[in-house]
Amino acid sequence: MGIESKYQMKVVEGDNGYVLEDVPHLTDYIPHLPTYDNPLQSNPAYSVVKQYFVDPDDTVPQKIVVHKDSPRGLHFRRAGPRQKVYFSSDDVRACIVTCGGLCPGLNTVIREIVHSLDYMYGVDKVLGIEGGYRGFYAKNTINLTPKLVDDIHKRGGTILGTSRGGHDTTKIVDSIQDHGINQVYIIGGDGTQKGAAVIYEEIRRRGLKVVVAGIPKTIDNDIPVFLISSYYN
């Protein structure tokens, strides 16, 4: 896609050769944000998850087998539900976009995001951006509901459509602001994820309370850190 990101990796170093390649966070540029109890704690269907909340300081080592005298080495932030979140469910307005080439499973991912947001977190405002990145400023959107996406995993392709290119950072972030979106889910390969990083940089520059979540989609298995993409093979 020819997109250049200026994002500098967030690296934290500790004792005994410990290195954490961290991920960007809202509090990096908006300090003292209020937090809310994770809605999962009051959802009877998911109450068991209380046993599995991830501590914010949990990390995952790149290598699980090391010599006892070796440096602790490279670590990554552990994914999973936290006890505290930074958005009230009523305030969330999310969007989902698929970019790049087609591959199996795209509709399944769209379905799971919509279902998870609604059934697990009580979020019912989810926009689908049609036609890839250019759909943001072409204003091609649909409202995604659990009922609408319930059977889409049985169909090929992506109900949102997709395209290559079309990345205009200013127009995309303008559209995110205009729609009042504060959670952006971007499904795509390595080029798409570079685009997601550039979108994040512009969001951060503007000081917006908007999170960008990149969901890897590749049939080439060429996105670092992930051992196997869900679309590979």
Image: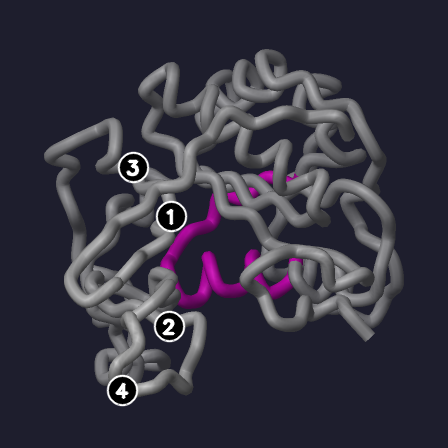
Residue bearing the label numbered 3:
26
* Neighbour tally class for label 1: few under 14, some 14-19, many 20 plus, Cα within 10 Å: few
Q: CA distance from mark 1 to mark 2?
A: 15 Å
Q: Secondary structure at mark 4?
A: loop
- Spatial CA distance of label 1 from label 3 is 10 Å
Q: Nearer the viewer, mark 3 or mark 2?
A: 2
- The reply to whether callout 4 and callout 1 are in contact (CB within 8 Å) is no
| Callout 3 touching callout 4 (CB < 8 Å) | no
Residue 219 falls left or right of residue 174:
right
Q: CA distance from mark 4 to mark 1?
A: 28 Å
Distance in Å between CA atoms under marks 3 and 2:
24 Å
Query: Hey, what amino acid is under mark 1?
Result: Val
Res 209 → quadrant:
top left
Of callouts 1 and 2, the N-terminal one: 1
Highlighted magenta segment, given as a residue range: 110-128
Q: Which mark is residue 68?
A: 4
Residue toward you, 19 or 83: 19
Q: Which mark is residue 61?
A: 2
Between disc 3 and disc 2, whose residue precedes?
3
Q: Which residue is mark 1?
A: 23
For badge 4, the amino acid type reads Lys
Q: Is residue 202 above or below residue 23?
A: above
Nearest-to-viewer mark from 1 and 3: 1
Q: Residue at x 29, y 37 (%)?
A: 26
Q: Residue at x 69, y 46 (%)?
A: 190
Label 3 sits on what residue type? Leu
User: N-terminal of the two: label 4 or label 1?
Assistant: 1
Which of the colour schemes (rainbow, by chain, secondary structure, one colour) is used?
Answer: one colour
Does residue 119 belong to the magenta stretch?
yes
Work out which quarter of the rendered image holds the N terminus and state it: top right
